[in-house]
Image (cartoon, rainbow, N blue to C red):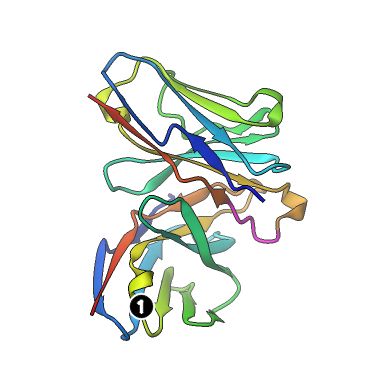
Amino acid sequence: GEDVEQSLFLSVREGDSSVINCTYTDSSSTYLYWYKQEPGAGLQLLTYIFSNMDMKQDQRLTVLLNKKDKHLSLRIADTQTGDSAIYFCAESLPGGYNKLIFGAGTRLAVHP
Amino acid sequence: EAGVTQFPSHSVIEKGQTVTLRCDPISGHDNLYWYRRVMGKEIKFLLHFVKESKQDESGMPNNRFLAERTGGTYSTLKVQPAELEDSGVYFCASSPTIRDALYNEQFFGPGTRLTVL
């Protein structure tokens, strides 16, 4: 079945690294995504990883994919107060039309 | 370029009433999706249009929900009659044609928060 799970809340100190974790059940995922939602705004694609990759780095963001364990993580280096938001993990499945399967979102709170 | 817009941003109605949500996708995007997030839970897929045709409506909860996309441009999602469990945030997203989408990025609107009392 299709299921994506993530922890609901993470609190970090400004300047530390944040790691947000996600597990998924469908091994046929083609792409996995991290979306960010700031208060009052829509979901913004933060980064994505193709299912045949293990890691992707983009400036302060590092995505790790463990296909064997069906585990995806997002690391944010040097976390800033502007990173406070809800982060959604999502997967798309093969079939051409790619509806997204989302988790419940992890609320990241960054404190001084 | 304008992003995905949704109207209204917030709607409060009573149980049994009708509400219509509107989504304007990014111009030229053939794919339009509706999703819903209920009570802080996961965002769930409702349906997918390709131009004016419903490609996948497997996520529509029941026949009280009716989605249309006249002319393949904007889309409406009508809930009639609304029930308490319909409360949540309704997101719309759009994406280009599959051949143009390298990794199927879906561009989301800000959502409509629906409260049914």
Residue at (46% x, 46% y) in the render: B110
Vertical position of residue A79 compared to residue A23: above or below: below
Vertical position of residue A11 compared to residue B8: above or below: below
The question of residue A97 being in magenta is answered with no
Q: Amino acid at mark 1?
A: Gln
Residue at (41% x, 23% y) in the render: B62
Residue at (67% x, 48% y) in the render: A96
Q: Main secondary structure of the magenta part?
A: loop
Name the secondary structure under disc 1.
loop
Residue beneath label 1, please? A80
Indicate the position of residue B7 as horizontal and vertical percent values. Answer: 48, 32
Vertical position of residue A89 compared to residue B72: above or below: below
- Taking the image as shown, residue A68 lies to the left or right of residue A111, namely right
**Nearest the eye: A42 or B87:** A42
Vertical position of residue A31 compared to residue B57: above or below: below
**Nearest the eye: B87 or B45:** B87
What segment is highlighted magenta in the picture?
Answer: B102-106
Q: Residue furthest right?
A: B99
Count of numbered tags: 1
Looking at the rendering, in which quadrant would you find the C terminus of chain B?
Answer: top left
Residue at (57% x, 44% y) in the render: B4
Indicate the position of residue B26 as horizontal and vertical percent values. Answer: 65, 44
Indicate the position of residue A52 as horizontal and vertical percent values. Answer: 60, 73
Write down the chain letter for disc 1: A
Indicate the position of residue A78 as horizontal and vertical percent values. Answer: 38, 85
The question of residue B103 being in magenta is answered with yes
The 10 Å Cα crowd at callout 1, few under 14, some 14 to 19, many 20 or more, is: some
